Image (spheres, grey):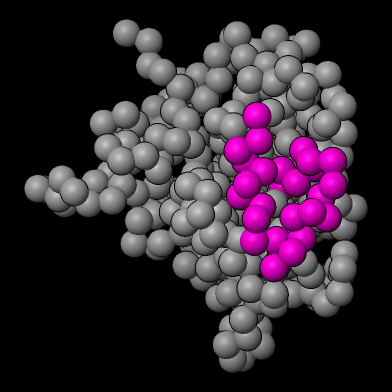
């Protein structure tokens, strides 16, 4: 029997445990009415970053596949086939912010795995700011969403949820109330149900900034991680907890992210994109966990 692809909706719909066995749980025995949980994988390796802070492509690729194995509880090739099929047209939504872009090595790793899963080269593209005009993205049936996590002057955090803002013609329309309505973008016709996987880059995340497009080398650190999941809310909520813990460690007190990244919780509660409740997130930790902060 061919296993169907797991979609984001499987993680948030009632009864999803039956639809996505092995990925969604319903609590302990007899907890029939318990809310489903979303599995998120945090994988870290101390040696992934070189002396200049650039990732080792081979190690990064291994981390990605290890996360896929843990997420889907299958060998990596089978796991990728749970995400895409040879008939899919796939856009890899990246992020090109010059100070902290999605690593090209990660883009290459995702691209190579999609090709191995049978996606045709002409049906595969990587893009960020040109997604609205990119011919592959215009006919995409599946999106792989990846970006580094960083503090952000408008939304509190630049997250997986926020990474899709380039699909709208006027991003500024979603900037109000600390970008509270970002989750609405995921329900646009060109995106609804298409995001198959979220890879939040935690290699050198930025935990503090001031002002629009602010970057300070003082406020990034070699965390050496990736957070991978189907549920974007659970992925981003996990990343936010790590950033909050790092801020407390660095500043020596509770210093909330400003503005508060409440778009994450709102994306779950108002827009039905997933769960931000730590008690409903099945967090799988892989590899180096010294100072994991979560």
Q: Position of residue 149 (x, y in %)?
A: 69, 57
| Quadrant in which the N terminus appears | top left
In the picture, measured across the screen, residue 25 lies left or right of residue 217, that is left
Q: From this view, report whether residue 78 is shown above or below residue 155.
A: above
Seen at 41% across and 62% down, the residue is 277
Q: From this view, report whether residue 239 is shown above or below residue 70.
A: below
Seen at 41% across and 18% down, the residue is 4
Q: Position of residue 212 (x, y in %)?
A: 87, 68
- Residue 77 seen: no
Comparing 196 with 15, the one in front is 15
Please say whether residue 184 is one of the residues in the magenta stretch.
Answer: yes
Dividing the picture into quadrants, the one containing residue 178 is bottom right
The secondary structure that most of the magenta stretch takes on is helix
In the picture, measured across the screen, residue 175 lies left or right of residue 129, that is left
In the picture, measured across the screen, residue 126 lies left or right of residue 288, that is right
Q: Position of residue 130 (x, y in %)?
A: 87, 34
Please say whether residue 243 is one of the residues in the magenta stretch.
Answer: no
Which residue occupies the extreme left position in the image?
30
- Residue 176 seen: yes
The range drawn in magenta is 163-189
Q: Position of residue 40 (x, y in %)?
A: 46, 48
Q: How many marks?
A: 0
Dividing the picture into quadrants, the one containing residue 261 is bottom right
Comparing 164 with 201, the one in front is 164
Seen at 65% across and 55% down, the residue is 181
In the picture, measured across the screen, residue 192 lies left or right of residue 34, that is right
Seen at 62% across and 24% down, the residue is 142
Q: From this view, report whether residue 288 is shown above or below residue 156.
A: above
């Amino acid at each position: 029997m061919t296993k169907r692809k797991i979609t984001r909706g499987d993680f948030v719909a009632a009864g999803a445990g039956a639809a996505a066995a092995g990925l969604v749980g319903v609590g302990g025995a007899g907890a029939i009415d318990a809310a489903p949980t979303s599995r998120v994988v945090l994988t870290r390796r101390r040696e992934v970053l070189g002396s200049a802070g650039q990732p080792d492509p081979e190690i990064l690729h291994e981390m990605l596949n290890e996360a896929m194995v843990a997420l889907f509880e299958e060998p990596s090739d089978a796991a990728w086939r749970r995400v895409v099929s040879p008939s899919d047209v796939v856009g890899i939504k990246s992020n090109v912010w010059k100070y902290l872009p999605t690593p090209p090595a990660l883009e290459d790793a995702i691209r190579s795995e999609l090709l191995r899963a049978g996606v045709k080269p002409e049906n595969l593209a990587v893009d960020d700011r040109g997604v609205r005009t990119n011919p592959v993205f215009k006919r995409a049936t599946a999106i792989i969403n990846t970006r580094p996590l960083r503090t952000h002057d408008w939304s509190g955090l630049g997250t997986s949820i926020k990474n899709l803002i380039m699909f709208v013609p006027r991003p500024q329309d979603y900037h109000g109330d600390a970008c509270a309505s970002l989750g609405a973008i995921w329900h646009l016709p060109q995106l609804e149900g298409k995001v198959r996987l979220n890879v939040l880059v935690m290699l050198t995340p930025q935990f503090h900034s001031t002002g629009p497009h602010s970057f300070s080398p003082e406020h990034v650190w070699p965390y050496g991680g990736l957070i991978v999941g189907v549920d974007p809310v659970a992925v981003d909520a996990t990343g936010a907890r790590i950033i909050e813990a790092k801020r407390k460690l660095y500043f020596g007190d509770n210093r909330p992210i400003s503005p508060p990244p409440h778009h994450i919780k709102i994306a779950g509660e108002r827009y039905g994109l997933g769960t931000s409740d730590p008690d409903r997130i099945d967090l799988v930790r892989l590899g180096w966990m010294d100072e994991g902060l979560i």
